[in-house]
Structures are given as structure tokens and as C-alpha cells.
Image (spheres, rainbow, N blue to C red):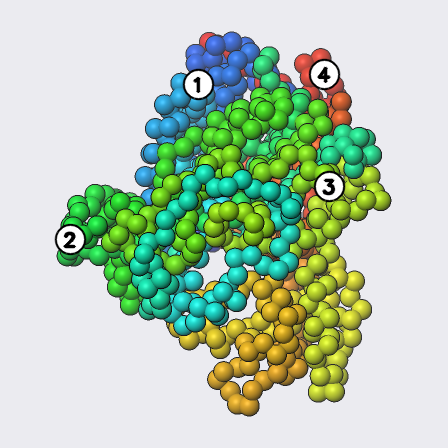
Amino acid sequence: MKILPFIISTVITSGLVVVLNSTMVLPAALGKLLSPQHGIWQNAESAHEDFAADLKFPQLKGKAEVYFDDQLIPHVFAENDEDLSFIQGYLHAKFRLFQMDLQTKAAEGRASEIAGSKAINYDKEQRRLGMRYAAENSLIEMEKDPESKSLYDAYTNGINAYISTLTEANTPIEYKILDMQPEKWSNIRTALLLKMMAKMLSSGTENDLEKTNAKSILLPDDLKALYPEVSDSTEPMIPKGTVFEKPGIIPVKPTNADSLYFGNTSSIAAKEISKPDVNNGSNNWAVAGSKTKSGSPILCNDPHLELSLPSIWYEMQLSTPGFNAYGATLPGSPFVIIGFNDSIAWGVTNAQRDVKDYYEIKFKDKTKKEYWFDSQWVATKIRYEEIKVRGGNTVIDTVAYTAFGPVMFDESFSNSNSNKRNLAVRWMAHEGSNEGKTLYLLNRAHNYIDYENAIKFFECPGQNFIFSSKSGDIALWQQGKFPARWEGQGIYIMPGEDSSYMWQGYIPQIENPHALNPERGFLTSANQRPVDSTYPYFIPGQWLIPRSIAITHFLSDTTKRFSPDDMMKLQNNYFNVTAEDVLPILFKYVKEEMLTVQEKKYLSELKQWDLMASANSKGQTIYERWWETLQHSIWDDELGKTKSETPFPIEQTTLELLKKDSAVKYIDNVNTVPAETLFDQVTAALKEASIGLVKDEAAGGIEWMKINKPAIYHLLKANLLPFAREHLSVGGYGNIINATYGSHGPSWRMVVSLTPQTEAYGVYPGGQSGNPGSKFYDNFVDQWAAGKYHPLWMMTKNEVSDTRVKWKMVFSKS
């Protein structure tokens, strides 16, 4: 970024923050912010910035070198693991300190310290979910293992070593805008960051509250039809026909479950404030050498998350005499998260498994000190949460902990004053675990056996670990600690007065869905159901279907031998596989004779559409508006009977219902006479959609990028901030392989060919530096938007004179 535009942008930003939220930046701080000696001028980075340094720290055991290439990607060579972790922490802090600080404060429920009173309810929810409690439990496990503790300690020491070098002048610009100071790091903050990832990837895959609302207004047969556990079009992660062993644990269903649990109940007023996006998913696949041009496996991964500046990922190479790994790292946590080493490659997608349940608690009185459980009054554990509020008084929130977990919702906390129900939350993330050990071992793995041993430590969030090796193996394992449920357990709010409704055990790790070297020559996961209906365990979740269908169709081609270039094109594919199924229904049932000239124009344009959700596609916009309007026409009357949130069936369910029976009863609007047919609803939906399309055309056009509005915002989330990138020329959608939708989408794209000399490519929508005043702040964004990649250079020590090396940092013991 040029210095002058950066200064102007920052001044505008600061002024807006002052005007919009006086609790965040006091006007008195504005003068300091503009100080030439200490303010934002000091954060404007020259295009020729020198990142070379000779650094000495007493915590180090030996000497290490960091070589930055021309994209500011560090290649770290250390003599031992502890020094490597120290340096990784130092570099994460140097380039992403504010990001780490903000994310872990938000995870803990401390956003009010930054944003003031408007964040109080968010902080309450984080604390009532038990985020700090969960992190404390995991920290015990993390530090119980001596090897893990030494690495987390070293990582924390590296972060704090960088923080100790900060002056008022070179403190990251966000601290100056917000008039804040950095806070020292500790191992609990790394645990908090990992729990925040657990929330984002395992807390949006259940909808117990919403399904309970649906149960209050729908009959059992309707519930099964609208929310099927196994869809007709399921393309499971583990190939169909896989034979599963008899279950190692058989949970016992309570004798009174049908009457207490499955009977109709009243609706639930409570709902989550910050429920994660259900589209927090990903694509990954591995193709065996039998299907590639090189004869070696290819592994691909693109995790779909909220896109931000700075990016969630930080690219780097980590190397000691014992291992050599490269890939995407997570600022705030050590190790490579997604990547490859000299022998293997690995990646992850979200398992979409439901590992969070709600239980209704009966308290003895308003003190909440006792609750009824197994025919007696049992004492709760009261946790007093102190929420400090910037510019306001400290808020004390009292949270009762039960045998199920913390009481997340009660009369003092909900989004509705009508909430009178006490709901405790049981969440797998509350259990102590050490997911970092999986990553530590994967970074150093050599083969399938090492991979299998490494992933056993990963408990929450459930993830689909894709694997390939230079020995030719490909594998996929859905890994996590999953409750062994009786049929139907965990779909709705459960009674909290009876221990028989608790989790009775966990699916043995070896029985988690997995596959090795399938006959078809490839494995893929795209957040679909992991297995078909022959799997012996009940596994509720929210499955996403279309992407897996599209990827499987492409990789099933027996006439092709794939190259890395083919895989990069596939990651950027815009083909709308859902529209391919939906449009024949829309075209068949629309009454063209009832359409206006304008409506016929939209219909004609859609008939000529190539089914690609490209940036300039008008067909994608028309299709989405028409199909979305039709779904509302079908479901609003049945599911709008309660003011509480009730989920629509996923679009694949709606599609399958219409394909099976064009006269299915849900088509009729129960609130009107006479009864509507599918002809009526499809035609009316196009007419209604056309009204909005005409307005959009008048306002600037209906090209998909103008409607989808792909953008990447700064972490502070204000779209007024000039530190964002808007108006990106990108297509895609959540159910399309290139799953870009608004500010959500592929946060890291990686393609690794496991040839003797590894061939790897990657890109993420951001830049290595978190400083908006640096040219490395967003320099990958245009490359990412264009579907291009850069080679992932696994540097060797004999390449230190390579022209790609631009700066060298030396770390040594003082």
C-alpha cells in the first residue's frame, strides 16, 4: 500500500470510529494517533522495507535462521523443536499480533473491553457456552504432556519476546486506532484460540433449538420428511458398499423417550447470538497415482471460512534436523495446520457432526443453587463471570454448571423476554483434549501408520483428515470424539432431570468412518454425510450435499489422468450442480402465458445460461432469486406458525420432494384458498423474484458479483474501514465447488503432487503482513480472485543464495 493513501485511509477510519463509537476511541487519543513520532505515520511501511535482523534471546538453546522470500513467506531452520516454536511465536506476533489478541479476547468473552456495551450479550454468550471453561480443561491436557508443554511454553515465550520489543511508535495500528495496548500471551490464550475454532466448526452443525420449534408445530411424519437423516442423493465420504463392523458400543434408549422426548412441546424463544455459519466447511480430495499423469498421488484442500484481513492463515516453512513441513499456520497456535512435509500431505474439512446437545434444567428456586436430577436435588457449581465494559460498569453474570454443563439460556439471558426455560449445554469441546499433538505428529509423519497414530489425539472439532504419501497411499478418516447416540438422541432439547438422557459413551476411534486406497482411486469430503445408511451408529448433523456430488462426478472420469493444473481448475470450478437438477422443474411448471414481457426476458436468459456461477453471470442471479423465492413460498406457511426460529429443509430436501411428487402437500399454501399447485407456485415465484431483479438492474445490474458482493473485510468487521477489499471479480456460491459467498469462502487453496520432488501450489486471500500499511497486507488477494496460485517452495539450506531469498533473520541465544 502506498504511504499517502494509507495515511489518508487511516485518518478517515479513525474519525469514523470516533464518530460512530465514542467508547472505542476517545477524541483525546486522536492527536496521539496522528503524531509523526508515535502515530500512524510510523506504521506506513516502505515498499523497500528491510526485514533482515540479528536477534538474541536468552530463551533460545541454539542458533536459527529465517529466510524470507519475495512474498514475505518465512522459511525457518532451527536446531531443535523448542527454538522452532519460539521463532514461530515471534513471527506470528510480529506480523499478526492484533489478530491474535482480538480473536482470543473474543473467544473468552472479552469483546466488551474493546467494543463497549454493545458487546455485552456476545460476551455473555461466550461465557455461558463455557469457552474459558473448555480452554481451561484443554490446557490441563496440553500441559500434562511434557513434550507438548515445552512447545507451547516456547511458542508463548516467542510471542512475548516480540511484544517486549514494541515501542509506542511501532505498535500495530489497530491498537492506536482503538487506544489500546497489547496484552501478554499465555498458553491459555492458545487453548482459547483452538476452542474458538472448535466453536466455528462444531457449534453451527446442530440446530436442536430450531428443530424443537419445528417439533412443536409438525407431526412426526412431517419431521421425517422435512429433515431426513439420509438424503436420496447422498454421495457419502466413505464409498458406498463399504462394510462396517458391528458397533463396539450400543447405547440404551430411555424407556420413556418416545413420550417425553419425541412428543410435541412448546417452542423455544432462546437462540444463539453468534451461531457459526453452517457453510463453515471445506473441500478436500486425494487422487491415487493410478489416476494422475505423474503416477503419484495428488492431495487438494480448500477450507471455507469467513474471509478477513489479515487472513486467518499465515504461510510458512518449519524445519529442524528431524522434520521439514510447509503450509498454512494459524497465528496464535504452533505447528503447520494444513500442509505437507518431505513424505506426506494432509488437509481437513469440517465433519459437520453434532457434538452439542441442550438439556432442560429444573431449578429448586431462583438462586439456581440446586437442580432436580435423578430424583433428588443436586448442587450446582456457580461461576461468576466478570465482564469488563469499556466506557461502562463491569457486569457480573452468574452461570450455573450442572452435570450436563453450563446453563447457557435462562430467564436472564435469551434473545426474547418470553424465555422461561433453563437450558444447559453439553458440548464435546468442554472435555480436555490436546489437538495440537495431532498437528505436531502430522508435521513429522512419514507414512500411513504415522498419520493414523497422529489423528487419534484430535477430539473436537470433528474433522475429515485427508492424507496422501509418496509411498502411494491415499486415505480419509473422519476424526473426532463422537457420542454413541441412541436413535434420535440429540435432535431436540432433552430432559435434564434424568441421567438416562446423557451421553452413554463414545464411538470407538477405530470405528469412525475411514477408508484407505479405495478401488475407485480417489477419496473426497465436502461436508457431506460421511457414510450411507448401513453405518451402525446414529449420527445427526447438518450435511451439505451438492459440492460432493460435483467433485465425485469430476474425479470419477475414467478417461482422464489428472495433473495439478486440473486440480487447481477444479478448486475454482463454478458449475452449479444444484441448478442442473432444479431448472428442469422450474421450466416444466412455469406458466409462460402468464408472464409479462420482462418476466419472459428473465426466463429466456435463464434458459440460455451455461450453469456457471461466474462473476458476470446474470443466469446465476435469476436462478438463485427464483429458486429462493419458491422455497419460501413452499415453506413459509408450514414453518411460520411460531415466532421462534424454525429451520427450512435444506434445498436438497426440497428438490428431492419435488422430484418425487409434484403434488406433494407442502406446495399448497395452507393460509389461502383455493389450493395452489406447483404450476401456481413456480409461476408466482418467478413473478415475485422479477420485481427484485428489476430493482437491482436499475440500481446497477444483476451480474452475480454485484448481488453476491464478494469482499474481504478487516477483522474489526466495520465495512467502513478502508482496510478492506470490496468489489472483487469473483463468482461462486456455498453449494458450488468454488464456495465464495459474500465474505465467506475458500480461505486457503492447496494442491500437492507427491512426486519424488514434491510439486505444490497454494494461495490465500490476504497477505503475510497484518499491517495495512504494508505491500504484503493483501498482495495475494488479486491472485486468489483470479484463480491463480504460487508455487509452495520447500526451501533447502543449500538454496540460501537463491534469488527468491530477500531477507534473513538470525536468532541466537544472548
Residue at 61 percent of width and 52 percent of height:
711
Q: Amino acid at mark 4?
A: Glu
State which tag comes first along the sequence, 4 or 3. 3
Question: In 3D space, how far apart are the residues under numbered discs 4 and 3 (Cα atoms)?
Answer: 40 Å
| x, y percent for residue 243 | 60, 42
Q: Which mark is residue 367?
A: 2
**What is the crowding at mark 3: few (fewer than 14 residues within 10 Å), some, or many (at least 20)?**
some
Q: Amino acid at mark 2?
A: Thr
Question: In 3D space, how far apart are the residues under numbered discs 1 and 2 (Cα atoms)?
Answer: 44 Å
Q: Amino acid at mark 1?
A: Glu
Residue underneath mark 3: 520
Q: Which mark is residue 799?
A: 4
Residue at 53 percent of width and 61 percent of height:
228
Residue underneath mark 1: 147
The answer to whether one can see residue 257 in this image is yes
In the image, which is nearer the foreground, mark 4 or mark 3?
3
